[in-house]
Image (cartoon, rainbow, N blue to C red):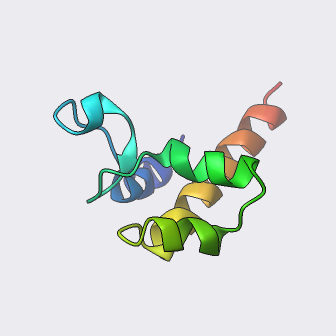
Amino acid sequence: MTPEQQSALADVVSIDSNIMHGTPCFAGTRVPVQSLLDFIEAGDTLDTFLHAFPRVKRRQAVQFLELAKDRLLAECGSS
């Protein structure tokens, strides 16, 4: 992961042992990033997720998905 990606990730995801026992959450919320992945896996839209978790900003969710995509493509390209 590039330093730019790490910085971007820190703006989107926080891991704090005092919040949700260290589960990665969207920064400034108690919403686990896994919740977004669960919604997508279930076939729900991003808008459905954002409606269910209004504290998560669209920018955060989109940036998280973009970072995950970049990471996946980098891993696939390095094998």
In the rendered image, the quadrant that contains the N terminus is top right
Q: Is residue 57 above or below residue 14?
A: below
Residue 45: where, in percent of width, then height?
A: 70, 68
Residue extending furthest top? 79
How many numbered discs, if any?
0
Relative horizontal placement of residue 46, taking residue 58 as reference (left or right): right
Q: Residue at left 37%, top 46%?
A: 25
Residue 38: where, in percent of width, then height?
A: 63, 45
Q: Quadrant of residue 64?
A: bottom right
Q: Quadrant of residue 66?
A: bottom right
Residue 62: where, in percent of width, then height?
A: 58, 67
Q: Residue at left 40%, top 58%?
A: 12
Residue 55: where, in percent of width, then height?
A: 35, 69
Q: Residue at left 77%, top 44%?
A: 73
* Nearer to the camera, 31 or 11: 31
Q: Is residue 40 visible?
A: yes
In the rendered image, the quadrant that contains the C terminus is top right
Relative horizontal placement of residue 16, taking residue 32 as reference (left or right): left
Residue extending furthest left? 18
Q: Is residue 16 above or below residue 7?
A: above
Q: Residue at left 72%, top 62%?
A: 44
Relative horizontal placement of residue 37, taking residue 29 as reference (left or right): right
Q: Is residue 2 visible?
A: no
